[in-house]
Amino acid sequence: MPKTNFDILWIILSSGLVFFMQAGFLCLESGLTRTKNSINVAIKNITDFGIATLVFYSIGFGFMFGSTYYGWIGKDMFFPDFSKTSPETSVFFLFQLMFCGTAATIVSGAVAERMKFGAYIIVTTIISSLIYPIFGHWVWGRDLQNWDQFTGWLAHLGFMDFAGSTVVHSVGGWVGLSAMILIGNRTGKYGKDGAVRKITGHNLPLAMLGTLILWFGWIGFNGGSTLAFTSEVPKIITNTMFAASGGMASSLIYGWIRLKYAEATLPLNGTLAGLVAITAPCNAVNSIESILIGLVAGILMFEAGVLLDKLKLDDAVGAVPVHLVSGIWGTLAVGFFGDLSILGTGLDRVTQILVQLLGVVSCAALSFGVSYPLLFIIHRFYSLRVSPQNEFQGLNYTEHRATTELIDLFMEMEYQKQTGDLSQDLSIEPFTEVGQIAERYNLVLDKIRTNIKEKETLAIELEHNLSLLQSDLSTARKIQSGIISQEDKLTGDLEITIRYLPLTEVGGDFFDIMELRPGLTRVFLADATGHGVQAALLTMAIKAIYESLKRGIYSVTEILYHLNNEFLHTFKNLNQFFTCIVVDIDTNLNLIRYSSAGHVPQYLIQGREIHSLEKTGRIMGVIPNTKYTSNEMEFTQDSKLILFTDGLFEQWNSQKEEFGEERVEAIVGNLKGIPIGEGIDQILKKLDEFLAGAPKQDDISVLGISRKIKK
């Protein structure tokens, strides 16, 4: 304990360094969280120290350093009046208060971005009044009238934790873990498939500054724990620097090997892991051992983070790997590496390790065993977690009504999203990056308004035309029946079977069969968007355009090229499209030549073989001047060609099972040797059996083409 004024000055200076660590935690945690939550995290780091001060003074200090009750808890020294005590006691309280505040702050990072501010104050109160003081009594409790007389039961067993790897850091880590489990993960952190979504902090340079501040403050954290300015202080501070550097190096290199890149937060948390680990044994190890302790801490920190992700436990800043895992390792390292003569416990190496392990387990039992049940009960009556809506908006605004330029921008955007009102531009904050974003967004809004106005005009025109058509459905039916013949045909040397089943009275399928010259027949099949009156309107347009192109002056590819361009010109800006296939059947040369614009594969049966007529170009109505290619295939005396629209297989039964292309192809494969008309009827019969009374969902057109049977 401090014996001279110089010792007292050293402890006050160390207390100031440890207090300055609060600024480091503030920068680190707010930098590692998103902008919308950074103010909330900063406020927590300020508030928790003030709360810890009041609670530790009124209750915690008495539980920790009051007269002991069988080594378990202090029973007096509540609300002490330090103005009437020696300065040694006052400065000792000051130093211990800094440690209490540090333990409370650790939880802030673990549960950042989803815990209510009021809930965090409750957690800080629990740590400062019960968990930290009671475990601190077990390890550091002492008779304030006789400074060298330790009173805690763990201290009597020989448990050593020089500056708080377990007493401070593991306590905060265990409480943070229990709170993380209770309140759950940040929305979107883990996908349903187990994928981990990395949520990057908004200001990594600020977080790095926070790490350097913490590193600097650890000089007082470990060096001040001598409670006197002794010759051991330089060694302790040097060991602290070595371990921090070892943790930084190992986490960076090991993580680089594992991840294949130098992840930005590894030097931060690796450094802190080394600092936490050396905190317990810093007075009893040499320089090489300090570096080794830091190296192991950096690797353990990385693997602990990986394990948390596997368990789907969301630690926003890595508090559990840094403070809990590294704190456990540092506490055990006292037994593994500590100079037994310096420790002065009188225990051999194995016994010292076992006692250190007992301390770790005891800390877990008290910290997790008290915090989890208490927080669980509180959570039943007062939700510790913010609502999903508040989490989405960010805790800066929802918890504190603290706005920033970016938040104000998001609020205006959210209003537009909720109301659909795009009539007003966003407010522009001049000479800022956010203002530049708003200015660009307003240009996009202006373009959207123009497009919406154009589409509204077109929609009104289309609605007017459709209303006229719907007002006289019989007229549409007559028109479509005029352009689509549903009777089987004999064309040249070909027999053509036609099955047309519109979903409603009028449909969106269209086909045309024409003999260009003796021995050459052209077949056209199209499937327009949707069904009903609107689709029927499109088929009429397709019919009108195709009629002007179908004569023999154009090849199958030229027909599709011009049909696409004319259709785009006619239905400009209406986002309408269709698929089609055009087939020229030459019975003189026993060939077919076809071109398919996005149409589903069709089938050609030749003896025992089935061939597919695959797509040769993109669908109609998407891009102007689209080039199409064609294919040629044999069409012998026994050949049968089956053309159909996708309504044939895109039908679903009551079990949500699709009829499907594979089922159609299998049925077609069994049609060898059967007249084409009977074969098509078999396909439709199988479809009806499959649907078992369920309604059809699309128009169906099937054309079967074969050579006439010569008598």
Image (cartoon, rainbow, N blue to C red):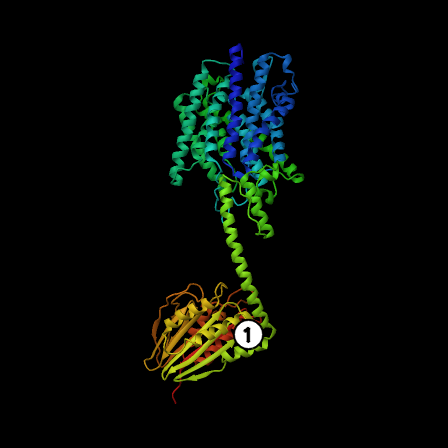
Where's residue 668, x and y in %?
Answer: 43, 74
Quarter that holds the C terminus = bottom left
Q: Residue at x 48, y 17 (%)?
A: 344
Q: Farthest residue toward the left?
A: 589
Would residue 474 be seen by someone viewing this image from the given angle?
A: yes
Q: Nearer the viewer, residue 340 or 13?
A: 13
Looking at the image, is 436 positioned above or below residue 483? above
Would residue 192 be seen by someone viewing this image from the given angle?
A: no
Query: Which image quadrant for residue 370?
Result: top right
Where's residue 201, x and y in %?
Answer: 49, 38
- The kind of residue tagged 1 is Val
**Left or right, 529 with reference to 142:** left
Q: Farthest residue toward the top?
A: 4
Query: Which image quadrant for residue 408?
Result: top right
Label 1 crowd (10 A; few <14 / some 14-19 / many >=20): many
**Left or right, 393 with reference to 599:** right
Q: Farthest residue toward the bottom?
A: 711
Quarter that holds the N terminus = top right
Q: Nearer the viewer, residue 178 or 393?
A: 393
Where's residue 599, x and y in %?
Answer: 43, 68
Query: Which image quadrant for residue 68?
Result: top right
Where's residue 36, x and y in %?
Answer: 55, 39
Looking at the image, is 217 positioned above or below residue 431? above
Label 1: element kind: loop
Looking at the image, is 168 positioned above or below residue 585? above
Find disc 1 in the rendering and name its residue: 506
Say how many tags the image has.
1
Q: Nearer the viewer, residue 624 or 154?
A: 624
**Left or right, 309 with reference to 370:** left
